[in-house]
């Protein structure tokens, strides 16, 4: 993992997913946020949803700022690239930057990563 020379104490991280009427997807995102917080205890790691659940992305960025974040990294928790990752989330990131007057950076979505192939392979081999 890359070392950042800037203070990690002023970093907010927002993991954002689509949102669902079902609770299971939100619980998965919360588990990822919790695990990330354990690895980076100085970061403020929050979750957000584009639809159907709270908080939304703007609320989460606002929470990061109110907790002292000087910059926020928004990580789309999406594998497939599409409208949300190419239009909706970038637009919300720009809006959050203007509304909260802090830098809000958009991280690339998960997309393809060879490490995900290992997870898929592990799941498949469990049933062979």
Image (cartoon, rainbow, N blue to C red):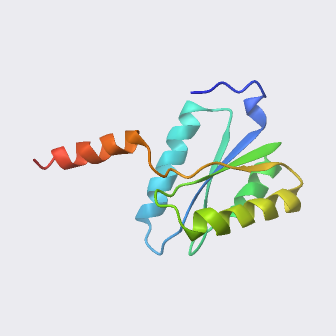
Q: How many marks?
A: 0
The structure residue drawn at horizontal position 87% and vertical position 60%, both measured from the top left corner, is 98
Q: Quadrant of residue 59?
A: bottom right
Give the vertical position of 100 relative to 36 (above or below).
below
Among the 4 quarters of the image, the one containing residue 42: top right
- Rendered location of residue 40, percent (x, y): 61, 32
Left or right for 74, reference 9: left
- Residue at 24% from the left image edge and 42% from the top image edge: 122
Left or right, residue 52 beside residue 21: right
Q: Percent x, y for residue 106?
A: 69, 51
The answer to whether 117 appears left or right of 38 in the picture is: left
Observer-nearest of 16 and 35? 16
Question: Quick check: 87 above or below 74?
Answer: below
Image location (x, y in percent) of residue 83: 58, 70
Quarter of the picture containing the N terminus is: top right
Q: In this view of the protein, can residue 69 be seen by the observer?
A: no
Decide which of 20, 5 is in the foreground and name it: 5
| Residue 73 x/y as whole percent | 70, 47
Is 103 positioned to the left or the right of 46 in the image? right
Q: Please state which of residues 69 and 83 is positioned toward the viewer in this rendering.
A: 83
Give above or below for 81 relative to 1: below
Query: Which corner quadrant of the image does residue 61 belong to?
Result: bottom right
At 54% from the left and 39% from the top, the residue drawn is 36
Q: Is residue 98 above or below residue 66?
A: below
Task: Residue at 86% x, 62% y: name it.
Answer: 99
């Amino acid at each position: 993992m890359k070392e950042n020379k800037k203070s990690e104490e002023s970093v907010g991280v927002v993991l954002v997913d689509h949102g669902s009427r079902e609770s299971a997807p939100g619980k998965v995102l919360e588990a990822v946020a919790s695990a990330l917080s354990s690895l980076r205890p100085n970061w403020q790691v929050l979750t957000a949803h584009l639809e159907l659940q709270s908080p939304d992305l703007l609320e989460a960025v606002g929470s990061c700022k109110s907790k002292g974040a000087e910059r926020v990294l928004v990580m789309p928790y999406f594998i497939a690239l599409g409208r949300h990752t190419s239009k909706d989330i970038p637009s919300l990131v720009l809006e959050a930057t203007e509304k909260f007057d802090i830098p809000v950076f958009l991280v690339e979505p998960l997309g393809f990563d060879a490490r995900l192939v290992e997870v898929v392979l592990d799941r498949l081999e469990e049933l062979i």
